[in-house]
């Protein structure tokens, strides 16, 4: 998809090592409930705040492509994989702006735990003005961060209606209560390393790719 349809474009980044059903459910709920034109799933090539992924960038991109096949509202975006330097969201947003235009509404989709650390991100204040932030959280949970500085920004920018995300290109924060799925990529990797099945935690197409390519296996598995 080229993002030419009207409406906000969502950005869901991550290592996707591997992508799983909680990632996909978050993307789908943000797409529908925030009235997004599409959600771009952007695998990080060299995440600055995480350990080196267990699968290669190309393998993680392929797993994303397999996971979203048949869903026209979701798109795999390889722009971070085409960079030679570390993956910073501010650079990804600049690249998307060059493609989609300065006036297009862009919505960065984050979990509440990631948003709580937003002050550690490169040029975070500029980023807050460049994009809207959709903060995914459990029903009944207030994602307002404990940090006084970030908390002040949250209170100043927070909105209660997702349709307001269409009114400007960025600068707002919307808390989105989502279906709580206790699934993590690390747990899936632990299953695979132990020789137990992570089936029903991720799409069958992704699990088949992992098994075919012998990903995340324990060195003792031979």
Image (tube, grey):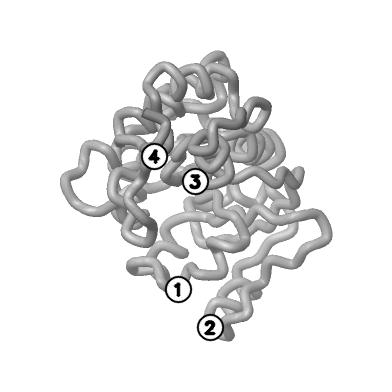
> Dot 3 corresponds to which residue?
105
Mark 4 or 3, nearer chain start = 4
In the rendered structure, the answer to whether residue 37 lies left or right of residue 84 reads: right
CB within 8 Å, label 1 to label 2: yes
Tag 3 or tag 2, which sits nearer the N-term? Answer: 3
Q: Residues within 10 Å of mark 1 (few under 14, many from 20)?
A: few
Which residue is identified by label 4? 43
Left or right for 204, reference 143: left
Q: CA distance from mark 2 to mark 3?
A: 25 Å
Q: Position of residue 78 (x, y in %)?
A: 32, 33
Q: CA distance from mark 1 to mark 2?
A: 8 Å
Do callouts 4 and 2 mark residues in contact (Cβ within 8 Å)?
no
State the residue position of label 2: 149
Pointer 1 or 2: first along the chain:
1
Can you say whether 148 is above or below 47 in the image? below
Crowding at mark 3 (Cα within 10 Å: few <14, some 14-19, many 20+): many
Task: Name the residue located 55 percent from the left edge and 49 percent from the top edge.
Answer: 109
Q: Residue at 76%, 43% (x, y): give it.
A: 179
């Amino acid at each position: 998809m080229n993002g030419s349809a009207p409406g906000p474009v969502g950005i869901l980044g991550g290592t996707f090592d591997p992508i799983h059903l909680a990632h996909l459910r978050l993307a789908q709920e943000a797409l529908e409930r925030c009235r997004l034109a599409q959600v771009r799933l952007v695998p990080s090539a060299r995440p600055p705040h995480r350990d080196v992924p267990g699968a290669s960038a190309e393998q993680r991109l392929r797993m994303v492509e397999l996971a979203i096949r048949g869903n026209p509202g979701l798109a795999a975006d390889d722009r971070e994989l085409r960079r030679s330097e570390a993956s910073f969201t501010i650079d990804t947003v600049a690249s998307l702006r060059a493609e989609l235009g300065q006036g297009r509404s862009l919505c960065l989709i984050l979990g509440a735990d990631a948003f709580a650390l937003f002050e550690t991100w490169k040029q975070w204040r500029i980023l807050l003005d460049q994009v809207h932030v959709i903060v995914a959280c459990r029903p009944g949970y207030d994602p307002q961060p404990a940090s006084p500085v970030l908390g002040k920004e949250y209170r100043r920018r927070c909105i209660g209606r997702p349709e307001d995300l269409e009114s400007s290109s960025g600068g707002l924060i919307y808390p989105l209560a989502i279906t709580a799925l206790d699934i993590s990529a690390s747990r899936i990797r632990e299953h695979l390393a132990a020789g137990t099945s992570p089936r029903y935690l991720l799409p069958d197409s992704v699990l088949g790719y992992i098994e075919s390519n012998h990903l995340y296996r324990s060195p003792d598995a031979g």
